[in-house]
Amino acid sequence: MTPIKKAYGYVTRIKEGKTQVLVFQHPIAEAGIQIPKGTVQAEEDTEYAVIREIEEETGLRNFHVEHLLAEDLWENDDGAIHNRFFYKITVSNAADEWDYKPTGGGEEEGLTFHFFWISTANEVELIRGHGDYLNHIFN
């Protein structure tokens, strides 16, 4: 079975000298608090995929992909193996919080995500797997 490629973005900013990471509250309670991420399309570069996912899920346009933080193989709750790519992204001009309707279609059609920033790895409980590399941001 070929692993499913997933691109994750730790969108970061500096506020009052502290690093913060962008997260969002999913409107479906079981989906919890997440970071922007999505499936890499066939023949798509993972860095391009994370850019596309951030634009589709957050509405942000003015950001920069710094570098790949980590790549791993991970077993999802449904038993599928994901080949995950975590990128550090920087943004210099973003609101403290906002709501956005994702534009990627599919399962997210008609939903509204509520975005906000966290300043520590333990400030909120992210859904399983999303916080696995926060220690590379908050150290």
Image (cartoon, rainbow, N blue to C red):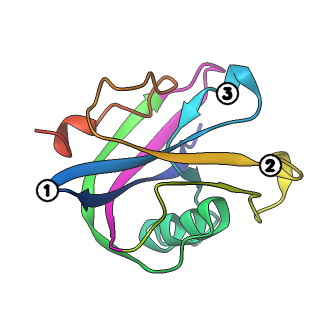
Residue at the (42%, 25%) spot, across then down: 124
| Residue for badge 1 | 17
Residue 31 is tagged as 3
- Name the kind of residue labelled 3 in the image: Ala
Mark nearer the N terminus (1 vs 2) = 1
Alpha-carbon distance for marks 1 and 2?
A: 34 Å
Q: Position of residue 78 (x, y in %)?
A: 66, 21
- Name the kind of residue labelled 2 in the image: Glu
> What secondary structure is marked by label 1?
loop
Compared to 128, does 97 lie above or below? below
Q: Do callouts 1 and 2 mark residues in contact (Cβ within 8 Å)? A: no
Q: Quadrant of the N terminus?
A: top right
Residues 120 and 107: in front is 120
Viewer-side label of 1, 3: 1
| Residue for badge 2 | 108
Q: Quadrant of residue 107?
A: top right
Position of 26 with respect to 128 (left or right) is: right
Residue furthest front as drawn: 16
Q: Position of residue 87 (x, y in %)?
A: 34, 58
Viewer-side label of 1, 2: 1
- Name the kind of residue labelled 1 in the image: Gly
Compared to 76, does 47 lie above or below? below
Mark nearer the N terminus (1 vs 3) = 1
> What secondary structure is marked by label 3?
helix
Q: Position of residue 48 (x, y in %)?
A: 49, 74
Q: Position of residue 24 (x, y in %)?
A: 56, 42
Residue at the (53%, 42%) spot, across then down: 3
Mark nearer the N terminus (3 vs 2) = 3
Q: Residues within 10 Å of mark 2 (few under 14, many from 20)?
A: some
Q: Quadrant of the C terminus?
A: top left
Specify start and end residues of the magenta stretch as a single range.
75-92
Asked if residue 85 is among those painted magenta in the image, a careful observer would answer: yes
